[in-house]
Image: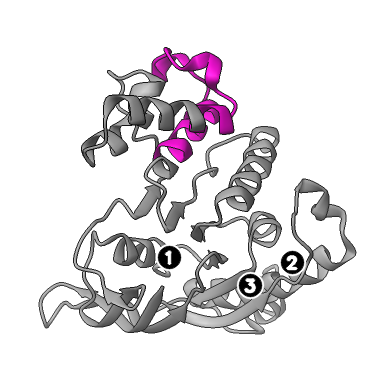
């Protein structure tokens, strides 16, 4: 997967807003890459480019050296908000992609059972989404995306709305699925711990306009699980991310280094008669 000098801008010439500017990045097949950056830096826009929902204003977006011309089942997308069909059962939701690709009923049912087992929801095949917890719905979302056996899995803060304990369980489950199937994963998150735990590489994005400003290679051993959070190297990678993100976040709020110190020195003094 390659983005080569990709830019995205919206609006008329006088009111043109550039979201991404000359963004270049490459993700190897089977690699797990996380995108980190301040709000508004264009992380989700990158996913929409790769998904084929959006076309670059300039530059190119390639998968397997071929230009992306639109959405494709080989690029599965998992959003933060649930997109399950509420009128379909869990099994029917997972069957939907393979069924739309023309596979037989027996094949689609077999695929759904396989992924239900992989995400630990075999007992809930006949339930409807409204009958599941938030974490369980996310597992169905992931299973549905994987049921097409995509080469690329795009994930836009999929665990952002979950409580801390459920989030850890989901992160562990995602790592297990990725180890088994090895899709190429592009994962957007605001959570530094999550990025370090999951990714082979972390790409830090800058603001105004969005672009990749730094890359951190997470060279902790695989397979990984949540116990990696206690690895001494984890803190080092987290610190590198924090330093870079703090700098970019200050820019997003219009602050320069030293502004806080200047504000402290200019506190209001009490008036004297």
The residue stretch that appears in magenta: 115-144
Q: Which one is in front, 185 or 196?
A: 185
Residue found 25% across the figure and 69% down from its top: 68
| Dot placed on the residue nearer the N-terminal end, 2 or 1 | 1
| Crowd band around label 2 with a 10 angstrom C-alpha radius: few (<14), some (14–19), many (20+) | some
Residue found 65% across the figure and 57% down from its top: 198
| Dot placed on the residue nearer the N-terminal end, 3 or 1 | 1
Q: Quadrant of the N terminus?
A: bottom left
Q: Which residue is mark 3?
A: 246
124 shown above or below 245: above
Residue found 68% across the figure and 43% down from its top: 172
Q: CA distance from mark 2 to mark 1?
A: 19 Å
273 shown above or below 208: above
| Crowd band around label 1 with a 10 angstrom C-alpha radius: few (<14), some (14–19), many (20+) | many
Lateral position of residue 23 relative to residue 194, left or right: left
Q: Which residue is mark 1?
A: 43
Q: Position of residue 120 (x, y in %)?
A: 60, 26
Q: Which one is in front, 104 or 135?
A: 104
Q: Which residue is mark 2?
A: 238
Q: Position of residue 215 (x, y in %)?
A: 60, 80
Q: Position of residue 115 (x, y in %)?
A: 50, 33
| Dot placed on the residue nearer the N-terminal end, 3 or 2 | 2
Q: For residue 89, which quarter of the picture?
A: top left
Q: Check residue 143 for magenta coloring.
A: yes
Q: CA distance from mark 3 to mark 2?
A: 12 Å
Q: Secondary structure at mark 3?
A: helix
- Magenta span main SS: helix
Q: CA distance from mark 3 to mark 1?
A: 17 Å
Q: For residue 250, which quarter of the picture?
A: bottom right
């Amino acid at each position: 997967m390659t983005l080569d000098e990709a830019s995205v801008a919206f609006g008329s010439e006088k009111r043109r807003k550039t979201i991404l500017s000359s963004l270049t990045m490459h993700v190897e097949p089977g690699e797990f890459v996380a995108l980190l950056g301040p709000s508004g830096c264009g992380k989700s826009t990158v996913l929409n480019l790769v998904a084929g929902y959006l076309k670059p204003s300039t530059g190119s977006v390639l998968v397997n050296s071929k230009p992306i011309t639109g959405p494709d089942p080989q690029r599965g997308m998992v959003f933060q908000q649930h997109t399950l069909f509420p009128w379909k059962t869990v099994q029917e939701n997972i069957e939907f992609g393979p069924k739309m690709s023309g596979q037989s009923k027996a094949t689609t049912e077999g695929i759904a059972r396989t992924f239900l087992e992989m995400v630990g929801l075999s007992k809930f095949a006949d339930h409807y989404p409204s009958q599941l917890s938030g974490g369980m719905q996310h597992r169905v979302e992931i299973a549905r995306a994987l049921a097409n056996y995509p080469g690329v899995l795009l994930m836009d803060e999929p665990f952002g709305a979950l409580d801390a304990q459920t989030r850890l369980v989901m992160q562990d489950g995602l790592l297990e699925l990725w180890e088994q199937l090895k899709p190429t994963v592009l994962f957007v998150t605001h959570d530094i711990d999550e990025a370090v735990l999951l990714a082979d590489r972390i790409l830090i994005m800058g603001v105004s306009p969005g672009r990749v400003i730094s890359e951190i290679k997470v060279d902790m051993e695989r397979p990984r699980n949540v116990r990696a959070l206690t690895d001494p190297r984890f803190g080092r990678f987290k610190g590198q991310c924090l330093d870079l993100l703090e700098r970019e976040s200050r820019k997003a709020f219009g602050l320069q280094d030293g502004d806080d110190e200047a504000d402290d020195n200019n506190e209001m003094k009490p008036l004297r008669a």
